[in-house]
Image (cartoon, rainbow, N blue to C red):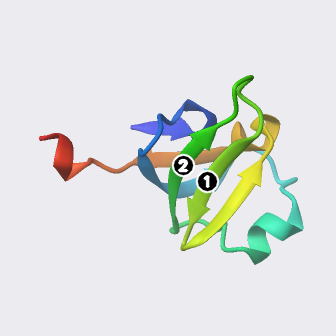
Amino acid sequence: MIVNVAQLKRGQKGIIKEFADDILPIKLLELGCLPGNTIELVQIAPFKDPIYINVNGSHIAIRRSVALLIELELLEDISQT
């Protein structure tokens, strides 16, 4: 199932598939936000902006507008089965 980072629930993980737009902050790419890497949603601020994620061990806060551009394939959580 393809979703974007803004649609994740706390604790959910996904593998980055692609970016909906070619314009993504260079800093995110430098921190490992690249296709094939895993993202976990850590926390969402009270008004849904910013979104706090974990990408390959790096904890990053990103704007919701940027989170909408990062498309993921959800990973099944084995602890929920």
Q: What is the crowding at mark 1: few (fewer than 14 residues within 10 Å), some, or many (at least 20)?
A: many
Residue 33, placed above or below residue 52: below
Q: How many marks?
A: 2
Asked if labels 2 and 1 touch by Cβ distance under 8 angstroms, the answer is: yes
- Looking at the rendered structure, the kind of residue marked 1 is Ile
> Where residue 44 sits: x, y (%)?
63, 36
Precedes in sequence: disc 1 or disc 2: 2
**Label 1 belongs to which residue?**
53
Residue at (74, 52) in percent of width and height: 61
| Location of the C terminus (image quadrant) | top left
Mark 2: secondary structure: strand
Q: In this view, does 72 lie to the left or right of 75?
A: right
Residue at (54, 73) in percent of width and height: 56
Residue 68, placed above or below residue 55: above
> Where residue 31 sits: x, y (%)?
72, 74
Residue at (70, 33) in percent of width and height: 45
Q: Residue 42 carries which label?
A: 2
> Where residue 34 sits: x, y (%)?
64, 68
- Looking at the rendered structure, the kind of residue marked 2 is Val
| Location of the N terminus (image quadrant) | top left
| Along the line of sight, the residue nearer the viewer: 57 or 35 | 57
> Where residue 52 sits: x, y (%)?
66, 49
